[in-house]
Image: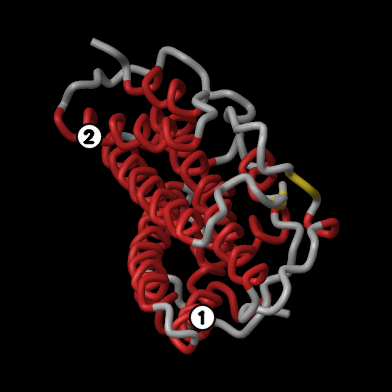
């Protein structure tokens, strides 16, 4: 029987986006069915396999999207969101494969379920791009998303603090405004995709927060103080308002975590 670690590694090393989505959902399904043995017999790659396109650029070299009302602006928006969800697949897979042995079966199951959700989100966004006569890879994308994972590859508490509780939580802040713009443009299909993603991301941030609280408990540390210390040490950006406090609180991320270090 295949080990859960080798199945996760194989999905991480799948470059083609469509095939990666199928592989990710298969790993999550096989784990739920008990078809993977609890064994961590391989290491996770330092970087997942990615397709040749999109071209990955530093955030400060990314071209401006253009106005949302233009065809170029719409395609740029959906392409940016598709890229975020594509990298999120690898972020969740790596979380389960890299830290699963020390964090246990519930942790692995949680993050494999997150990875399957991200694969579904990417598939929805890829189809949205195709409906606009474009495709994932047609535009450049920024290369910064994986850097946070690589920088925290030796510390589960730091990874949880930065990836779900900063990067994904930021999605809770910005998605409602994007959803309003899409609705105002009369794009009901796009609005349904964003509403689904927002609901799922609240749950994903909640999963990250739940396991971070476990880490804080094992360290006998204040969760808020530990989070602030780790974010200051490992996150290069700023924690900026406005915040979607209600969505963050629904995910277990109260203002006591982030208000003190917000800029």
Q: Position of residue 74 (x, y in %)?
A: 59, 70
Residue 253 seen in the figure? yes
Q: Earlier in the sequence, mark 1 or mark 2?
A: 2
Q: Residue at x 33, y 23 (%)?
A: 4
Q: Position of residue 70 (x, y in %)?
A: 65, 76
Left or right: 60 in relation to 183: right
Query: What colour scheme governs how the chains and residues are painted in the rendered image of this protein?
Result: secondary structure
Residue at the extreme left of the image, as rendered: 33
Q: Calculate the distance from the C-alpha at mark 1 to the C-alpha at mark 2.
A: 35 Å
**Image height of 197 relative to 216, above or below:** below
Q: Which residue is denoted by mark 2 in the rendering? A: 29
Q: Position of residue 169 (x, y in %)?
A: 51, 67
Q: For the image shown, how many numbered marks are present on the structure?
A: 2
Residue at the extreme right of the image, as rendered: 61
Q: Position of residue 143 (x, y in %)?
A: 72, 47
Helix, strand or loop status at disc 2: helix
Q: Residue at x 39, y 27 (%)?
A: 101
Q: Which mark is residue 157?
A: none
Helix, strand or loop status at disc 1: helix
**Image height of 170 relative to 116, above or below:** below
Q: Nearer the viewer, mark 1 or mark 2?
A: 2
Q: Quadrant of the C terminus?
A: bottom right
Front residue of this view, candidates 27 and 4: 27
Labels 1 and 2 touching (C-beta < 8 A): no
**Image height of 172 relative to 127, above or below:** below
Front residue of this view, candidates 182 and 14: 182
Residue 256 seen in the figure? no
Q: Residue at x 39, y 64 (%)?
A: 197
Q: Which residue is denoted by mark 1 in the rendering? A: 255
- Mark 2 crowd level (few <14, some 14–19, many ≥20, 10 Å Cα): some
Please tell me in which quadrant of the rendered image residue 198 appears.
bottom left
């Amino acid at each position: 029987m295949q080990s859960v670690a080798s199945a996760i590694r194989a999905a991480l090393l799948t470059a083609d986006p469509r095939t990666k989505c199928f592989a990710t959902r298969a790993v999550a399904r096989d784990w739920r069915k008990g078809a993977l043995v609890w064994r961590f017999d391989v290491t996770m790659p330092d970087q997942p396999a990615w397709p040749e396109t999109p071209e990955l650029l530093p955030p400060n070299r990314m071209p401006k999207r253009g106005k949302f009302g233009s065809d170029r602006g719409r395609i740029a928006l959906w392409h940016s969101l598709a890229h975020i969800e594509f990298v999120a697949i690898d972020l969740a897979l790596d979380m389960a494969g890299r830290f699963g042995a020390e964090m246990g079966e519930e942790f692995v199951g949680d993050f494999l379920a997150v990875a399957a959700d991200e694969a579904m989100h990417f598939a929805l966004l890829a189809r949205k791009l195709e409906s606009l006569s474009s495709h994932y890879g047609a535009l450049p994308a920024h290369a910064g998303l994986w850097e946070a994972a690589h920088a925290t590859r030796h510390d589960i508490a730091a990874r949880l603090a930065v990836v779900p509780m900063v990067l994904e939580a930021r999605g809770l802040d910005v998605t409602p405004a994007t959803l309003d713009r899409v609705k105002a443009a009369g794009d009901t299909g796009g609005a349904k995709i964003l509403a689904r993603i927002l609901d799922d991301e609240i749950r994903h941030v909640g999963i990250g927060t739940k396991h971070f609280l476990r880490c804080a408990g094992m360290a006998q540390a204040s969760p808020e103080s530990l989070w602030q210390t780790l974010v200051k040490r490992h996150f290069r950006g700023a924690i900026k308002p406005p915040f979607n406090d209600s969505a963050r609180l629904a995910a277990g991320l109260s203002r006591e975590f982030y208000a003190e270090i917000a800029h």
